Image: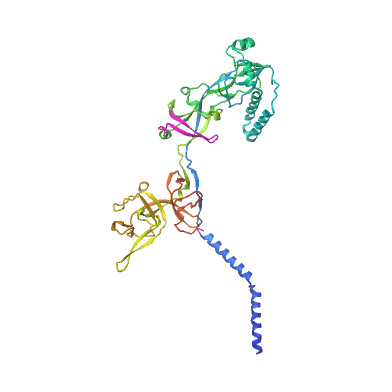
Amino acid sequence: MSGDKSRPGFLSGLLEHIRGVFGLNIGTMITGVLILYLVFSLVMYLTSAHIDTYQVTSGPLSRNETYTGLALREESVVRSQTGGYIRYYAREGSKINANGVVYSLSSTQSPQTSVKLSSEDMARIRSDMQSFSKRFDPSRFNTAYSFKYQLEGNVLQYEGVTADVVTSLTLDPENAAEVFSDRVSDSQASVVLLGNQTLCKSGEDGIVLYSKDGYAGKRLEDLTLSDFNQNTYHETDLKSSDMIKAGDDVYTIITDEWWSLLIPLTEKQLVHLKNRETIRVKFLKDDMTQTGDFSVVQIEGTNFGKIDFNKGLIRYASDRFLDIELVTNSVNGLKIPLSSIVTKEFYVIPESFSVENGTGFYLEERGANGTTSRRLVSPTIYARISDNNTTYVPTEDTRSDSTYLYVDKSVFNKNDVLVIGDEIEDHYVIGDTGILEGVYCINQGYAVFRRIEVLDQNEEFAIVARDTDYGLVRYDHIVRDATRVKEQDILY
């Protein structure tokens, strides 16, 4: 009896001894399970194939060729009729009206005028200064001088010098000649006096530049191949703080909105572009685009493309050479790698044999005793395509359907019979096949075939159509290298 009473104590003591040796408790067991799971996961990760994915993006296939074009404009260099220290009032690269003040001359350096501005005018000037400060680029410090001239011109405009005052002071040719004696010719009616300054106005509308490069007055027939050599191109800055003499070049004025770009063409480019009458151009300077009239001309036996524009000149008035891209390929869609594309064969079934709103088919089955029955099969539909949009050619015994459904070949067997009615002609024997291009989409963690329609491609990427039925959408994740995956493979 005493031995029986001692047995429970013996067992409990034994368990305590085991726990003391191995440290067995619920916390230890959970920790052990977690360690085993982590080790298993690490082994699986190190031994499994790693599949690169690609997120489907939207945009064009960028393969348009770039060119450097020579700008040809209607422009002329204006010379000073008198001498003196010059002060500029028109902003470089801006439009000026006929009789607008471009610059002034005086016998003393830095002439001063008394100008009183309203609070509104001062607010506009401060706003202009803040805008210039935000977009100022130290690598283009010359813009600071242009802005200085702009401010000085604005001050005159706010005071009314370039409008009412100048108009009231404008001299006719006879009076101008009398006041300025030998310094002013009878043809310079655009020179007026304001205090000790001689205000010089533009004789015509145009865009003002304070530089010259030797191309002013050149026509298409005057150009030579050397004119396209940028290494020998030289531009002369006409802005000066020294005293100038009569006859010195003061500024260049562009007087016509029509302008042209001339681009050299290789024989291959000539074949590609020669039948075009218009072409869309992207200016790489600011990514702006516009359409121009296109023609092919020859200069000293070399082919050039001539693109004529009737707008946009003011943005590029200070550039003789412009880098452009001819937008000859503007196909837009979903962009995918070529390595993602696979092909797959499907059974092709006329849509008229489908039921349940195109999602199912009645498969005819024969029993051992010769009886027939129907079973509804609802396979995944991979495409619904009109016969004029596919290379599939229906056999003669196929209905004259205009639309066909593409289903996986694993769902049916060849020579299976689909039925839609009770008549014999309402039976369809499965056998016709068609091939679709597609990719493996892995949004759900396993590879699913999605149909694509390729619109264009280059050496690395393809552009596929948007909104394709049963196809891709933007931001889908697909397998980058389709050769490493099979359909329905679980990837994560």
> Where does the image place residue 203, in percent across and percent down from the top left?
57, 18
In the image, 166 versus 321, the foreground residue is 166
Q: Is residue 350 among the parts visible in the rendering? A: no
Residue 408, quarter of picture: bottom left
Residue 289 left/right relative to 130: left
Residue 101: x and y, percent? 61, 21
Q: Is residue 198 above or below residue 405?
A: above
| Residue at 50% from the left image edge and 30% from the top image edge | 69
Location of the N terminus by quadrant is: bottom right
State the predominant SS element of the stretch in magenta: strand
- Give the image location of residue 266, x and y in percent: 44, 33
Q: Magenta residues?
A: 273-296
Q: Is residue 84 left or right of residue 354?
A: right
Q: Give how far across and how far down residue 330 sits, in percent.
A: 46, 39
Q: Residue at x 62, y 30 (%)?
A: 143
Tell whether 188 sits left or right of 273: right
Out of 268 and 114, give the one closest to the viewer: 114
Q: Is residue 352 above or below residue 98?
A: below
**445 versus 318 height, above or below:** below
Tell me if I can see residue 204 in this picture: yes
Quick check: 36 left or right of 115? left
Q: Based on the picture, tell me whether residue 294 belongs to the magenta stretch.
A: yes
In reply to whether residue 455 is colored magenta, the answer given is: no
| Number of marks in the rendered image | 0
